[in-house]
Amino acid sequence: MVDSPTVMRRLDILSDLMGPPVGVLLLLVGVQTYREGGSIGWPIGGLALLLVNLYVAGRRFARRRKRTSASASAASSSSSSSSS
């Protein structure tokens, strides 16, 4: 049987990790296109996508880190109160 929440959490993490490289690739292609006479919109779009992806990934990882540290501190406080 497949553990659906675990699979979805891993796919969510994968999408967070793949966003910035895609933004970098679009930025590089946009700069190359602009140097060859293309529109300035391509590098601007690539930069915007990269910044949005970094912002979203940073927020999600910060939220996960807070949950992990909060659960670890709750576990340590419950073990110290039970030993008293």
Image (tube, rainbow, N blue to C red):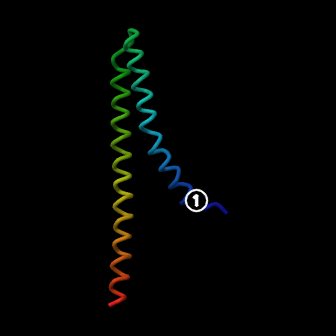
- Residue 69: give x, y in percent of width and height: 35, 65
Find the residue positioned furthest to the bottom: 84
Q: Position of residue 46 (x, y in %)?
A: 38, 27
Q: Quadrant of residue 33?
A: top left
In this picture, residue 81 sits left or right of residue 28 = left
Residue type, label 1: Ser
Identity of the residue furthest to the top in this view: 37
Residue located 34% across and 54% down the image: 62
Where's the N terminus, which quadrant?
A: bottom right
Residue 34 left/right relative to 2 = left
Could you say which is closer to the camera, residue 35 or residue 2?
35
| Residue 21 vertical position relative to residue 30 in the rendered view, above or below | below
Find residue 75 and report its image quarter. bottom left
User: Alpha-carbon neighbours of circle 1 within 10 Å: few (<14), some, or many (≥20)?
Assistant: few
Q: Quadrant of the C terminus?
A: bottom left
From what the image shows, is residue 82 above or below residue 13? below
Give the total number of marks visible in the rendering: 1
Residue at horizontal 44%, vertical 35%?
21
Dot 1 falls on a residue whose secondary structure is: helix
* Residue 3 at x, y percent in the picture: 60, 62
In percent of the image, x 36 and y 76: which residue is there? 76
Residue 29 image point, x, y percent: 44, 21
Q: Which residue is mark 1?
A: 4
